[in-house]
Image (cartoon, rainbow, N blue to C red):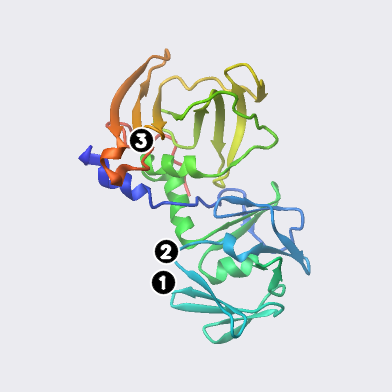
Amino acid sequence: MKKWKKAAVAVLTVAGVLSAGAGITVMAAPAQHAKVFSNGFYQEDVLTVNGRMMVQLRAFKDPESFVYSYNTATKTILVNNPVQKMTVHLKNGLKTAEVNGKQVKLDAPVTVKRGRTYVPVRFITETLGGTVAYDNVAKQIIARTPTGEEQFKTLKNGDLAKARTLAINIPRLNNHIEIVPYGEGFTTIYTFPKGEALRYFVEYRGLVTYVEIDDKGIAEIKWQKDTLGKNGEAGKKQEQFGESIYFLDNFMGETLGYGIVDSEGKSTELGFIERYKDKELANVIIVPIEGEERTDAREE
């Protein structure tokens, strides 16, 4: 266990996979009907002001790079980026922002609505060191933070165990494919093709879900089936992977089992962890498999 323990614990700090990739161009034109993804999360609560897409400030999180605060006396939102030694001041209704003491013009005014602060998505990402792009074909605005940029690189072509951990934590788009689990239980099983991180099955309470992650880092549900026969099936059926790796997470019992599945569907357990005995492993779900090498890495 010690051989991979430090790597597994480090993976726990990774949060929020962000999107970018092939087919994306720099965002220039307004995208009133585009879907916005920030920190890997689909943002339903967005505004369009003066033809510009506005996203909630809190949707752009990166605790490792910057922090937010609010000055009640001046009614000013403060964004501090100690990494880049940058301080940004934002105020409701203003079409300018103060960046390190200098006035910077915004595409649309800062807007506070229902107690939430909205800012132009391009300004907040580029000013704070992140990126934003517009996929003209899919009509998607893809934003990521500095930390998210590194996570995305790992997801595409980095360490296999870390990439798998990132993969299972990306929020899944259901695209109208969503079946409610019928069964009971406290065990979740993740199954990946041998050497791969960008597609997987997850089984919970009798519901099997097949997920694929695209070139922009967006996870989509492609197929679901209630194996108990109560709630049916949706999407395009996906056959089993054949030779694969599984991770069996019993969150109630605080245990993790993992192993391999051969081409004929026979499973062999490789290890079993009693996580309650080691707090550092409390939330570990994915661990490195000895001798396994990544085969699905994608080029930049």
Give whichever of discs 3 and 1 has the lower sequence position.
Answer: 1
Whether label 2 touches label 3, CB < 8 Å: no
In the rendered image, which residue does mark 2 sit on?
64
Give whichever of discs 2 and 3 has the lower sequence position.
Answer: 2
Residue 139 in picture, x, y percent from top left: 71, 50
Q: CA distance from mark 3 to mark 1?
A: 37 Å
Q: Residue at x 45, y 63 (%)?
A: 63
Question: In the image shown, does 185 or 14 lie closer to the viewer?
Answer: 185
Q: Residue at x 29, y 34 (%)?
A: 274
Residue 87 in picture, x, y percent from top left: 50, 79
Whether label 2 touches label 1, CB < 8 Å: yes
Q: Quadrant of residue 157?
A: top left
Left or right relative to 282: residue 86: right
Q: Quadrant of residue 104?
A: bottom right
In the rendered image, which residue does mark 1 sit on?
83
Q: Quadrant of residue 150?
A: bottom left
